[in-house]
Image (tube, coloured by chain):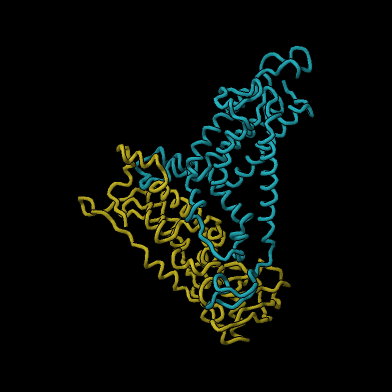
Amino acid sequence: MATTDHGVTSPGRARIDARTLREDRWWLQPLATFVVFSAFVVYATSRAFMGRDYYASPYLSPFYSPCLGDCVEGASDFGQPFGWWPLSAALIILIFPLGFRMTCYYYRKSYYRAFWLSPPACAVAEPHASYSGETRFPLILQNVHRWFWYAAVLVGLVLTYDVLLAFRPMPAEYAVGDGETSGIHMGLGTLLMIANVVLIWLYTLSCHSCRHIVGGRLRHFSKHPVRYRLWTWVSRLNGSHGRWAWYSLFSVAIVDLYVFLLATGTIQDVRFF
Amino acid sequence: MGYDLKMRVWRGDESGGELADYTVEVSEGEVVLDALHRLQATQTGDLAIRWNCKAGKCGSCSAEINGRPRLLCMTRLSDFEPTETITVTPMRTFPVIRDLVTDVSFNYRKARQLPGVQLGPRDADGKRRMAQIDVERGQEFRKCIECFLCQDVCHVVRDHEDNKEAFAGPRFFLRYAELDMHPLDTHDRRELAQGAAGLGLCNITKCCTEVCPEGIHITDNAIIPMKERVVDKKYDPLVWLGNKIGIRNKDANGRTEV
C-alpha cells in the first residue's frame, strides 16, 4: 500500500507497508456475506416488482403481506386501501421490513464490512480516505431503527395471522382426493410459514432496540422487576440476533419461492391433511 | 518438547523500522511473550517490550500477532503450527516509541475528557444504597484491563488519524455506558457521548468486541445501549412527546447534563 498520512501508515506509527499482516482467510466472511446478501436483494427485488404469483390459496407470500394494493382475489385480508396503486402491492409494505433490516445493528455491521469495506475485517485497512461514520446524512438516519421495530412488530402480527389462514381448506382445484378440500388443511406450505413466522419473531424480539425499550433504558432495574425480567429474556435472545437475522432472511425467501412455485403451477402442495 | 520457532519481529522507532527474522528455541506450554523474552535474553538484548503481570490482567503487553491485536502473554504458541512463522508488531494505531512499545497516551487524554461519577446526596443515615442487580449490571464493564486493544483495532482511528480528535473510542464508550447506567450518578452523559466523544462515528462493526481479552461485550452491552440512549434523547418523537405531556421516565429524574 502506498504511504498515506491518514491510516496505519500515518507519520509516527510503526512503519509497515502492508495494509494487514493477517494470514488467515479474513476475506471469506465478507465475501460470503456479499454474495448471499446480493443474491437475496436480486431475488427479493425481482419478486417484489413482479406483482404476480404471490398468492396460492391459502398461502400468501410474506413479501406481499398484508396485500393492500390491487391484489388478486383472496389475498387481501385487510382490505385494499391502496387499490389505486399502479405498481406491485409488495412495494407498499416492503419498505417496513426492508427499513427494519437495513437499520438493524447486526445487518449494519455485516454490510458495512461486506459492501462498504469499512472495515473489510478487523485490523484490515479500509480503502477510504475519509470517514464520518453515522454522524451525517444519510447514515445518521440509522437512528430511526426503533421506529422500524415498531412497524416490524405489526408486520410480525400480520404474518402470524397469515399462518392461521394457511390452515384454511384449500380450494377445489387443489383437491387430490375425496373430501380433501373441506375442513382444516395443513401442507408443507403451512409448515414453512410456521417456521418462517417463528424465525421472524425471534429476529424481531431479539432486536437491540427491543432490548433497550423493554428494560435496557432503565437506570434502576431494581425498581422495575417485570421489565428487568423481560430485559433478561430479550438479552438472551439478543445474543443470537445475527443468527436469527440470517435464518429469517432465508425463511422469508423460501416461503415466497414455495408460493411462487405453487402459483405458477410448477409444483403441487405437499398436503398432510 | 522444545522446537525452533521462526519469528518476525518489528524493530525500529518513529524514524523507521522493519520486520526482522529470528529463530528462537521454545518449549511446550509457552506463550508468545515467553518466546520474545528468550529472544531478548539470548539474541536481541535491546528489544523493547512493555509487559508486567504475564497473566492477562495488567493490559501492558498489547501488540499485534500475525496482524491481529492480542496480548502477548495470553497468546499460546500451541495456537500455531510449529512450522509457522509468527509475526509480531507493535499496535498500529498509536505512535511507536521503540520496537513493540507504543505511546498510548491518546487514551489517557480521552480518559481525562470524560467527567467522573457525580453521586447524589446520601441517605438520611449517611449511607448510599444500590440494589444488587443494579450493582451487577456494571460489573462486566469493570473487567476492562485497559489494554487498549479495542482502541487499536477500531478502524475509526486506526484507519483515520484525523478522527482521533473527535473520537473517544470503545474503551471510553464502555465507561460512558457504565456511568449512564449507574443508578446513583447524577450526570446525563448522552449529549456528551454523541458530541464530544463521537459515538456517532462508530459504525458498530464489532472489532472491539472481537479482540477484547476479557470477553466484554463492548458493542452489544455498552455501545449499542449508549446509542439507543442518545436516540431516546434526540431522535425519538415518542419520548419527546412523553416529556411534553408529563408521562416521563422517572429514571432520569435528578440528572443534569454535562
Q: Which chain is cyan?
A: A
Q: Is residue B61 visible?
A: yes
Of the 4 image quadrants, the one containing the N terminus of chain B is: bottom right
- From the top left corner, tell me how far across and down residue A225 is, in percent: 39, 39
Inspect this view and state whether residue B66 appears. Answer: no
Q: Residue at x 71, y 34 (%)?
A: A257
**Residue at 35% from the left image edge and 39% from the top image edge:** B241
Q: Position of residue B249 (x, y in %)?
A: 34, 42
Colour representing chain B = yellow
Return the residue nearer the eye: A48 or A115: A48
Residue A9 percent location from the top left of the image: 58, 74
Q: Is residue B18 above or below residue A82?
A: below
Q: Quadrant of the C terminus of chain B?
A: bottom left
Left or right of B111? Residue A154 is right
Q: Nearer the viewer, residue A260 or B18?
A: A260
Image quarter of residue B189: bottom left
Q: Residue furthest left?
A: B124
In the displayed structure, A172 sits above or below A235; it is: above
Spot occupied by residue A170 in the image (x, y as percentages of width and height): 70, 18
Looking at the image, residue A273 lies above or below residue B220: above
Image quarter of residue A18: bottom right
Report the residue at 71% width, 28% height from top.
A188
Question: What residue do we see at 23% from left, 53% from top?
Answer: B122
